[in-house]
Image (spheres, helix red, strand yellow):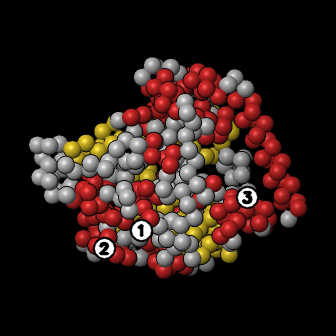
């Protein structure tokens, strides 16, 4: 029986099994918490075992590699303003595209709020896949398309969460360095069904559809991100992250996939050739690395990763990537998902059931599980963070 190892508690929904199946016998269907899980059609399955061969479950230790180099980085051009952090992803992606390759990364689709991986082959397409998306993205269709490009001799850079990158590496092992991977430092993936319910709730409150959404708007500065919702009636709403109901539930570990609670990829050793994250607390290390416009953390695990970093740095005198040496130990201390899995709240299943099955509003559920003072606590935390950053900059 294929995919016998694939239990709800361990499956990450990476989509590799769906992409490799020669008979299209596997589909990802909503399961526990609204998350996608693979389902096998016994009428189509021929028992070839391809899905089991690419599944990364049980292979995590063999896929992880220590970092060879760490860097703080920021885009010299307009890429930083268009990105959630320092624009490192855009610079790396541009270098791959300039060399005739393609990029497979996540794009948010509105209306609906679905996040799906897409193939990008030009500068214009990069705008679709920039910025953070705190959701479980759908990968399978894009993975099939990426395999087709690899078979034609093209290079394809895959960008995703570590579990998705693990599936990519197993799926594309025969293609070697033509299939580099960039993993993102991930704190878990919230339920896509919960996000859809959240969007509907916010649209009802505003009396208009959402035409644009930013999971981390940095108009108040990169160090002080806010959720931004832009509605069709011209209204725009910005809130510090933890004052937003969807993000508050995510931060409280109430909405992530079961496999995230004990993630085997939340370690300093990474599965990608290169790793990209926010360079949090960089001002405590070097205040001149932080102008509040965004600084990316880059970790290179392989020679291919170092080549990608070098190519991004040399992408042009005015549009290249500024890369500065960084301490790996400080990077690990400043990013919790580089140290250990973040766990889950004991009320997680009940919280998701209340909203997704019981029809309770996300606002009411968040207040019930986090307490009536969560909104005020989030506001105080945001301002304390601002004061700490000012102190660190002056001290530096």
Q: Which numbered disc flags the more N-terminal residue, 2 or 1?
A: 1
Evaluate whether residue 237 shows in this view.
yes
Q: Position of residue 140 (x, y in %)?
A: 31, 52
The answer to whether 22 appears left or right of 359 in the picture is: left
Q: Position of residue 215 (x, y in %)?
A: 57, 44
Determine the CA span between mark 2 and mark 3. 38 Å
Instruction: Say which mark, if any, is on residue 175.
Output: 2
At x 65%, y 62%, the residue is 332
Kindly check if marks 2 and 1 are in contact, taking CB atoms under 8 A apart as contact: no
Kindly check if marks 1 and 3 are in contact, taking CB atoms under 8 A apart as contact: no
Determine the CA span between mark 1 and mark 3. 31 Å
| Quarter occupied by the C terminus | bottom right
At x 63%, y 46%, the residue is 217
The answer to whether 325 appears left or right of 158 in the picture is: right
- Which residue occupies the foreground of this view, 152 or 245? 245
Circle 1 residue: 62
Describe the element under mark 3 as helix, strand or loop.
loop
Q: Is residue 206 above or below residue 196?
A: above
Evaluate whether residue 91 shows in this view.
no
- Name the front one of labels 1 and 3: 1
Q: Residues within 10 Å of mark 3 (few under 14, many from 20)?
A: some
Circle 3 residue: 281
Count the numbered circles shown: 3
At x 58%, y 21%, the residue is 364
- Which residue occupies the foreground of this view, 168 or 289? 168
Describe the element under mark 1 as helix, strand or loop.
helix
């Amino acid at each position: 029986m294929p995919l016998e190892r694939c239990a709800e508690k361990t499956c990450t929904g990476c989509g590799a099994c769906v992409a490799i199946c020669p008979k299209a016998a596997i589909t990802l269907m909503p399961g526990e918490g609204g998350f996608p899980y693979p389902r096998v059609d016994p009428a189509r399955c021929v028992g070839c075992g391809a899905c089991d061969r690419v599944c990364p479950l049980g292979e995590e230790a063999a896929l992880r590699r220590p970092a060879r180099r760490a860097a703080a980085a920021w885009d010299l051009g307009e890429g930083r303003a268009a990105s959630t952090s320092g624009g490192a992803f855009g610079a790396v992606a541009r270098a791959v595209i300039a060399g005739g390759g393609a990029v497979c990364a996540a794009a948010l689709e509105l209306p609906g709020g679905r996040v799906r991986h897409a193939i990008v082959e030009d500068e214009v397409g990069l705008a679709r896949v920039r910025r953070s998306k705190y959701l479980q993205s759908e990968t399978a269709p894009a993975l099939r398309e990426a395999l087709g490009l690899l078979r034609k001799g093209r290079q394809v850079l895959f960008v995703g969460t570590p579990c998705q990158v693990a599936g990519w590496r197993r799926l594309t092992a025969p293609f070697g360095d033509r299939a580099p991977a960039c993993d993102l430092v991930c704190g878990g993936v919230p339920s896509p069904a919960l996000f859809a319910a959240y969007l509907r709730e916010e649209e009802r409150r505003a009396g208009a559809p959402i035409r644009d959404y930013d999971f981390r708007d940095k108009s108040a500065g990169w160090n002080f991100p806010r959720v931004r919702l832009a509605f069709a009636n011209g209204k725009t709403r910005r809130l510090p992250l933890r004052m937003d109901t969807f993000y508050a539930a995510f931060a409280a570990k109430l909405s992530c996939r079961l496999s995230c609670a004990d993630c085997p990829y939340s370690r300093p050793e990474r599965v990608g050739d290169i790793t990209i994250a926010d360079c949090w607390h960089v001002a405590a290390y070097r205040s001149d690395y932080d102008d509040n416009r965004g600084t990316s953390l880059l970790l290179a695990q392989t020679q291919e990763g170092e080549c990608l970093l070098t190519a991004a740095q040399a992408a042009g005198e005015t549009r290249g990537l500024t890369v500065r040496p960084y301490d790996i130990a400080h990077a690990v201390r400043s990013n919790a998902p580089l140290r250990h899995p973040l766990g889950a709240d004991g009320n997680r299943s009940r919280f998701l059931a209340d909203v997704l099955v019981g029809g309770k509003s996300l606002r009411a559920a968040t207040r019930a599980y986090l307490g009536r003072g969560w909104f005020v606590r989030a506001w105080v935390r945001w301002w304390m963070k601002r004061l700490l950053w000012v102190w660190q900059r002056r001290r530096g």
